[in-house]
Amino acid sequence: MHMKVLMTGANGAFGDLTARALLTQEHRLVATMRDPDGRNADAAAALRSCGAIVMEIDVTDDKSVSKSVEAAIATLGGLDVLVNVAGTGTHGLSEGFTADQMLRLFNINVVGLHRMMRAALPTFRRQGAGLVINISSLLGRLSMPFYGPYSATKYAVETLSDTYRAELSQLGVDVVLVEPGGFKTSWIGNLIHPDDADCLEGYGEFANLPAQALAEYRAFLDAKPEQDPAKVAAAIVSLIETPAGARPARTVVDFVGMAEPVTMMNQQLAQVTAGLYQAFGIDGLLTLKVE
C-alpha cells in the first residue's frame, strides 16, 4: 500500500536517504526543510528530481508549521505518516552551553517535534488511523560525557513519545521511536559547541578532552563501514510498511556493539511499563486500536 508521508529534516543525511527509499517504494512524499530555495537549494532540487514534493518548514515557528502541514495535507490529499527527523546535536562540556543555547536546542529537538505532531494529529484522529515516527537516539537511552544537552532533548523525545503513544492508542494513531547510534554523516560536522568558553577555563586541560574524543570517534566511525546510515532509512521505511498494531514501540539501529544492551533496556522498560499500567488499570492503552 502506498502511503502519504510528511517528513521534516529532509536535507539531512537520515532525511535524504529516507526520502529516496520511500520514493523508490512509490510512497508519496512531502519532504520539508528550512530554506529550500537558499542554503538548502541543492538538497531540495535533488529530492524534487527523485519525485518528492519539497516544502519549507521551520519547526521552531508555529505559523510555518501550521501553514505548511496544512498545505502538505492538501497537496497529498490526506496524510498517513509523519516522520520527525529534524534535529540538531551538541558536543562539549555541558557547563559551557548558555541558557539561550539550551532553549534553542530544546525548541528544535523537542518543541519542534511537538509542533509537528499537534499540526498533524487532528487529521489522524479524524480518520481513526495514522503513524508518527519520531527519530530519537541511543543517547536518549544512555548518558555519555560531552553530549549532555543533546542527550537531554532525546530523553525528552522518548518520554513524550511514550505518553503520546498511550494517549492516542485508542484513537487508532500509532507513535513509535527510532533510536540510531552514531553514524558518519553531516550531523557530526554540524554539532553545536559551547558558547561560553570563559567558564570552561576552570576545567584546565580537561577542557581539551571533548575535541580529542570527537576526533577519535570520527576515526572510529571511519573504520566501521557496517555503520551505514542507509540502514536507518531502511528501518524507517520498514516501520511505515509494517501493518498497524504490529510495529515495535522502539527500533534500535546500531551495528557497532550498542544495539544489544539498549534493546535489553528497552525490553525491561516495556515490562515495567506494562506492570505499572496494569496496576493502574490502564493497560489497554498499550494496545493500538485497529479498525
Image: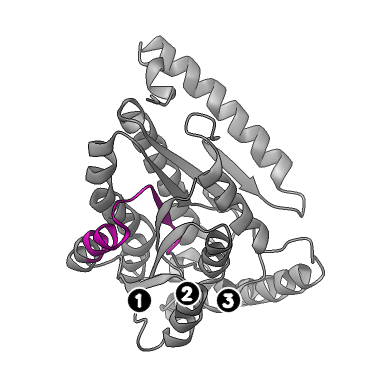
Q: What amino acid type should be assigned to the residue bearing mark 3?
A: Ser
Residue drawn at (37%, 25%), measured in percent from left and top?
A: 291
Tell me the mark number nearer the camera, choosing from 1 and 3.
1
Q: For the residue labelled by badge 1, is the local secondary structure a helix, a strand or a loop?
A: loop
Left or right of 169? Residue 228 is right
Q: Which residues are magenta?
A: 68-86
Q: Kindly indicate whether the residue at mark 3 contacts the one at mark 2 (C-beta within 8 angstroms).
A: no
State the residue in front, 179 or 65.
Answer: 65
State the image coordinates of residue 288 (x, y, percent, origin top left).
Answer: 42, 26
- Along the horizontal axis of the image, is 256 left or right of 13? right
Residue lying farthest right? 223
CA neighbours of label 1 inside 10 A, class few (<14), some (14 to 19), many (20+):
many
Are there few (<14), some (14-19), or many (20+) residues within 10 Å of tag 2?
Answer: many
Residue type, label 2: Asn
| Res 34 label | 1
Q: Earlier in the sequence, mark 1 or mark 3?
A: 1
Question: Could you tell me if the residues under marks 2 and 1 are in contact, i.e. CB atoms within 8 Å?
Answer: yes
Q: Residue 145 sits in which quadrant?
A: bottom right
Provide the secondary structure element on which disc 2 rests. loop
- Front residue of 168/275: it is 168
The residue beneath circle 3 is 186
In the displayed structure, 231 sits above or below 43; it is above
Residue at x 44% of width, y 71% of height: 96
Q: Which residue is mark 2?
A: 11
Residue 92 visible in the displayed image: no
- Residue 42, which numbered label? none
At 19% from the left and 65% from the top, the residue drawn is: 67
Q: In this picture, is 79 found above or below 291?
A: below
Residue 257 visible in rendering: yes
Earlier residue among tags 2 and 1: 2
Find residue 209 and report its horizontal and vertical position in percent.
65, 72
